[in-house]
Image (tube, rainbow, N blue to C red):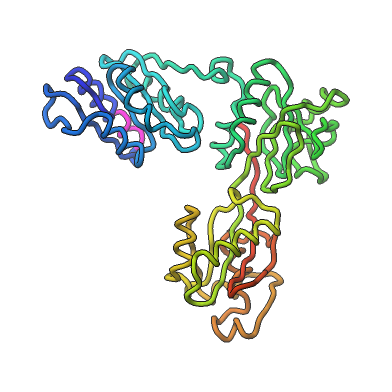
Amino acid sequence: MLCFSQTGWRTGERLRQGFLGKNREWEVSLDAKSRYVKNSIEESHGAWTKRQFGRADAVIFIGACGIAVRSIAPLVESKKTDPAVLVIDECGKFVISLLSGHLGGANALAAEAAGLLEAIPVITTATDLHRRFAVDIFAAKNGCGIRPMTAAKEVSAALLAGEAVGFYSDFPWEGELPEGLVHCDAAGRARPAECGGELAADQEGNLAENGGRQAAASAGKKAPRTGIAVSIREDCHPFPVTVHIIPKIVSMGIGCRRGKAAENLRRRAEQCLREAGICREALEGLASIDLKKEEPGLLALAEEWKLPFTTFPAEALQQIPGAFSASSFVSSVTGVDNVCERSAVCGSGGGRLIQKKAGAEGVTTALAQREWRIRFE
């Protein structure tokens, strides 16, 4: 947080103490840019903002809105990556959600800050104002990636205009479909009542409590032009305008000869995803045997893709149940008959293998998917 006066400092300190009282795992700092406040920062507010944009989840200005706008203007890039930005007047009467209201969490943070200050939250996002389903909040709460953002805007626009928005999922869900969403099949057509959300897209099961009523009411109507697809598959595009929601539920097991360059590992990892037809955004981590925990190429690939790299002892990998592509040579070298397939399954918490071992250039890869379901609140 950054304030610009003694009054702003007092408001900021109230808010800092309130945040820490409710969220003890948070790190909350308060700085001042004013010669009337002790230990005021020497750098410009623009330089301060640039530094915070690179490290903070949220930036709060306590002062005039114009200062905040001018400070963040050169730094704004994407709602996927920009931090939440709030502006609070120095007396703590109004809390404005200025940037990254949904994906960055600014709207929720503004509401929380307003509650702590007994202030009025100022939120201008249309879906919030009209209490409509927000696909970007849905993605964030379910730990999913989202693309393209242009289609996400189309979904919001359609809901605000009162149009039906299609909803297709490869996964089961809990709760009721939000108002305005119509359960559809893989071709984007409204599904009959017996095909509800408690199942994956083309399976059988009990559907009454998961959106069957909405689908029944919409059966026979024109297929929605705009819709949401929850899938890890690259080829899943049921609607003319599809926003793709991608759960991060796939672990890539990877093995390699010693000294393999990150470029070779990246090429084989990308090939593995292409052959499986899996979105890279679905990856939640890389996994291997603990013999490779210091392998420079694997560490570099994990850092480049911003993924955790987890390794397991040979004994733990060998105990994973399932049918794997065994190799006596690999067993003699590592103590386990297959590194990449077993690592993928172990990295996914015992999920199912969805891409078996493939190897080239001294690199082997495999993919496993953990169990997952959607949750509507």
**Image quadrant in which you'd find residue 346:** bottom right
Residue 4's x, y, as percent?
A: 21, 22
Q: Residue at x 64, y 85 (%)?
A: 328
Frontmost residue, 72 versus 208? 72
Q: Quadrant of the N terminus?
A: top left
Look at the image and say whether residue 22 sits in the magenta stretch: yes
Q: Residue at x 73, y 43 (%)?
A: 236
Frontmost residue, 31 versus 216? 31
Q: Residues in magenta?
A: 18-23
Residue 176's x, y, as percent?
A: 69, 30
Look at the image and say whether residue 357 sits in the magenta stretch: no
**Image quadrant in which you'd find residue 69:** top left
Q: Residue at x 42, y 70 (%)?
A: 294
Residue 115's x, y, as percent?
A: 38, 20
Is 81 placed left or right of 42 in the picture? right
Is 17 placed left or right of 188 in the picture? left
Q: Quadrant of the C terminus?
A: top right
Which secondary structure type mostly characterizes the magenta part of the structure? helix
On screen, residue 282 above or below 9: below
**Image quadrant in which you'd find residue 63:** top left
Residue 21's x, y, as percent?
A: 31, 33
* Residue closest to the far right: 220
On screen, residue 343 above or below 273: below
Count of labels in the image: 0
On screen, residue 207 above or below 153: below
Frontmost residue, 44 versus 41? 44
Q: Residue at x 15, y 30 (%)?
A: 40
